[in-house]
Each structure stands twice: as C-alpha cells, then as structure tokens.
Image: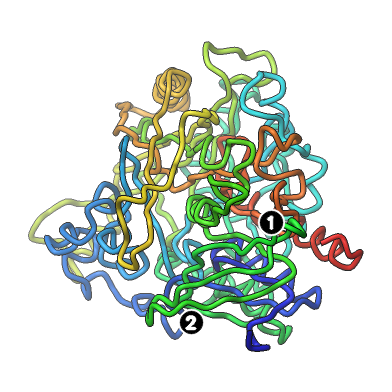
Amino acid sequence: MPENNVYDAIVIGSGISGGWAAKELTEKGLKTIMLERGRNIEHIKDYVNATKESWEFPHRGAKPTQQMIADYPVLKRDYPLNGTVLDYWVKDKECPYVEEKRFDWYRGYHVGGRSLMWGRQSYRFNKWDFEANAKEGIGVDWPMRYDDLAPWYSYAERFAGIQGSKDGLDVLPDGDFMPAMELNCVEKEVKQRLLDHYKGSRHMIIGRSANLTQPHHNRTNCQYRNRCWRGCPFGGYFSTQSATLPAAMATGNLTLRPFSIVTKILYDKDTKRATGVEILDAETNKTYEYKAKIVFVCASAFNSTWVLMNSATDVWEGGLGSSSGELGHNVMDHHFRCGANGTVEGFSDKYIYGRRPTGIYIPRFRNIYDDQRDYVRGFGYQGGASRGRGVEIAEATIGADLKEAMSVPSENWNMGIMAFGEMLPYHENKISLDKTVKDKWGLPVLKMDVEIKENEKKMRMDMMNDAKEMLEAAGVKDVKTYDAGYAPGMGIHEMGTARMGRDPKSSVLNGNNQVWDAPNVFVTDGACMTSASCVNPSLTYMALTARAADFAVKELKKGNL
C-alpha cells in the first residue's frame, strides 16, 4: 500500500456532520482524509447562481421545465425542484432506490452535501427529548441526557454562528446566540396577542437560524438576500464550505478527495477494529483502499447505514454494526405540510425591510407540563407574516408603475404557520439493501419501507386545528386550515437507522457514537438518532460530532482504539 493512502482518521461524507468531524479531528492534530462521493464545489467560485436574478432563469427559476420533471421523478414531488439549485440535487435516475412504500429521498452528492441547501433552522433538543423514550417505553433510551450535550451545543453554536433570542423556555433551551433578527410589525403584534390570550403559556419567537448577524471567523454577516441555498458568496450562513472546511484546511492536516464512493469499511476480526475503507472512484471506476486508526461515518443517515450494510463479512452477514438486528430500522423524519393562514388588518401603512432568511417559531406546547393528548410527543410551528403588493393592476406591474403600486398603503398582509411534528422510532420502519437493483456504478441500492402511524395521524389533527385556533386568537381574519399531505422523507430530516443506545443487543452505537462491533468506527450524522424531537436536527448533529471527535482523539491517545 502506498504511504500516502495511510492516515490517522478517515471521514466519510462532507456535509454538516462530515465537515465538523474533519474540523475537529484536524484541529486536534490528526492527519485526516475526507472522502466525498460527489464533485467538489468551491466556496464562492462555484456558486454559479448566487448572484443571478430571477429573470435570468427559465420560468424565473420557480417552475420546473418538462425536461427537469423527466430527469427528477422524485425531486419533482415537492418544492426542491427548481432552476436555481438544480445542480445541487442528485439526478434520481443515476442514483435510484426502491420504494416498497413511498419515500421522498432528496439528496445532495457533492462537497458540502446538504449543508449548502439546508433550511438553517437551529434548535437544541430539550431535557424531555432525551428522557421521553425511557419514560414512555418507546424504542430505546438515549445513552445521554441534555446536560451531557449542553456544553457541546454551546461549542457548536459559538463556531457556527446562530442568531436567536434568549427566551428562557424549558421546552426550547437558550443557546450561545448572536444578536437576533427582528420580528416584523405584524409578527410582534401576533406574538403579544398570543402571550396575552394564552396567559404566557404559548410563545412566538424569531426562528433561530445559522445566519450571521455580525462578522464571524472571516465570514461576513447576512445581507438579507434570502438566496442562501444557492451558496452564499458572503459566507453569511453556516455550511461546510464557509465554515468547517476552511478551518480544517488551515491546519494543514486535511486531504479532501471528491468523487470517492466509499463501498465498505474494512474490518479485522482478530483485533475487532476497522482498518480503513475501500472506495470506488466515481470517475474512473477504479478501486482504492485507505487505511486509518479511526473512521467517522458521516455520509448522511441512509448512506451511512448503506456503507455499514455493504460492509458485510463472514462475521456479520447483515453488515458492520448489525449484531443487534437494529441496523436499518427505526427510520424517522419530521412530518409537516399542515397548518393555517389568514389575513391581518390594521397595518396598511407598514412594510418589511429586506428579505429576512428566517421566519417565526412557535415552540412545542402539547404533552408538556399538565397538557395531555391522546398521542405522545408534540410539534412546533414555523411561518411568518408578509405583505403583498399594494395595487394589483395587470397593466401596472412592471417598472416605475410597479414601484409606485408597491408603495401604496395596502391591507394585503398575510400570516401563515406550518407545523413540524415528531415521528416515533418504529422498528418496522426500515431501509434495507436491494441487491437486485443497481445504481450507475453497479452498486446495490436501498429499499424503503417507512410509513407514519396512528400517533402521527392523531397529531396532525392538532397541528392543523391548533394553528387555526391560535391565529384567530391573535386577531387574524379569514383563517383557513390545510393539510397538503405528507410522505416520509419530505421533511429531509431522515434519521435513526443506526441508533445510539445503552445496550449492544438493542442499538448500533454506544453513548459515544461508537459502533458496538467496531469501537474505532463512529457514526455521528442523522443515522445515530434515538428519537427525533420536533425541532430541526442539524445543530444536534454538530454537537454530537464535536463531542464524539473529542472522545475519539482522547481514546486514541490512551491506546484504546
């Protein structure tokens, strides 16, 4: 084996978790290679659509062409299919999967992964999130509690740059925030009316997001362009490209290898350790091996599990980490796409400034304290208020006439909120390898067998009706509810297929994100999740990755790995 194929650490994947793993391991002195299956995207230089205006795209970038619909049969099911970010999404036909039950799998195979396209909403899990499984007898118990992760949440927030307000809520713990973005005039009024009506038991806050409100680590603060997912030339939001990759590169300890599909983790049954990985070069179809003392698997929840499954040996037929029988099981997502909206009166002389890249957030209020429903867990809301055009005259909607029309006082204010609900970790919701179907590179694909169940369906009724009740209580008029339907995967928060736990008989990973069956292999992305909470999970992945990397390096120095 050539000397340059030997490293201290291997990181599989370059998204939010992989970027954090690379940063932490290199800063602690480890020679690290980060393997990414897709192409490289360089910060600023490769954000080809970042400065384009709407009229420079076919159909203003909003509507897909017939060719796009044909090329992206999965992506077309929801909003991600549009012309402004098309190159960031995987071509479905090149990377197929099998749907035993419908599953919408939206992937980004390139350096940075979905850290380039994510919604940036960044919330901590609360103390109840880590306790609920044990208390309710659902799934397995988290092998940690909130206090174990709290310092790592702070560590991640301080580096990533999270804007938000300190609200003093048990249900949504405060963090180490940058100054918060502002609620607009309507949102401020609705916030106060909700507080008054519900006597301080329901809150509406600015959505906490990974957007800078002041310069930070050679990154410029947000410019309110609201084009984040095209890639930000200012580095105004957290991504691998803007934040963790530059930090890792600055150490001189990182090698980045794009077009590197990790096909298996190599395992030595005598030492019970991984020795490295095998990759398939996505451009040449040649196979290479890389050796290392530790392996961080951060390929995104399902692909990380695919790598583990495809690493089957005569020791474990079901793959590395399969000894418990839980590998591939307990798929979770966040179910959403239901809520309410209506019109707001009394603000005709008010307008909004800029294009704020976040909205409002209403934290969970169901099944906490004394509230008890006929389902378990809960949901929060995202949304906001906006003002439409002042005068709608078809002949006067361009140029100077349009500007004039926009400046005329208008009652055309709308307020909408959409719920995001927790999905329970059901053992029967699973992914598996389907060796009868192959992708572009001749590799087996995943088969999806996932559905929501009665608990989520009952929750959805509250998600919709509570939205209407709250908006009407806040004085919003003509409130209409909606349930636009949901299929697992649409939340783009897939997780849980290699869960953490306290017992190797019922989990894939221990409390330090180590694979029970190979303690020098760490899984720190969505695959590791034991439950889903109802908040966006990415901040938790950052904290877990930083915590696991710290542990791994200490154990390595002790000679335990």
Q: CA distance from mark 2 to mark 1?
A: 27 Å
Asked if residue 355 is positioned above or below residue 453 in the image, the reply reads: below
Is residue 1 positioned above or below 193 on the image?
below
Marks 2/1 in contact by CB < 8 Å: the verdict is no
Residue 316 at x, y percent in the picture: 59, 47
Q: Secondary structure at mark 1?
A: strand
What is the number of callouts on the image?
2
**Disc 2: CA contacts within 10 A as few (<14), some (14-19) or many (>=20):** few
N-terminal of the pair, mark 2 or mark 1, is 2
Comparing 474 with 229, the one in front is 229
- Above or below, 266 relative to 233: above
Of the numbered discs in the image, which one, if any, rests on residue 158? none
Residue designated by label 1: 522
Amino acid under disc 2 = Glu
Against 24, is 195 above or below?
Answer: above
Looking at the rendering, in which quadrant would you find the N terminus? bottom right
54 or 378, which lies in front?
378
- Residue bearing the label numbered 2: 42
Residue 29: image location, x then y, percent: 80, 78
Q: Residue at x 65, y 74 (%)?
A: 215
Between 194 and 15, the one nearer to me in the picture:
15
Q: Is residue 217 left or right of residue 525?
A: right
Q: Position of residue 17 (x, y in %)?
A: 61, 60
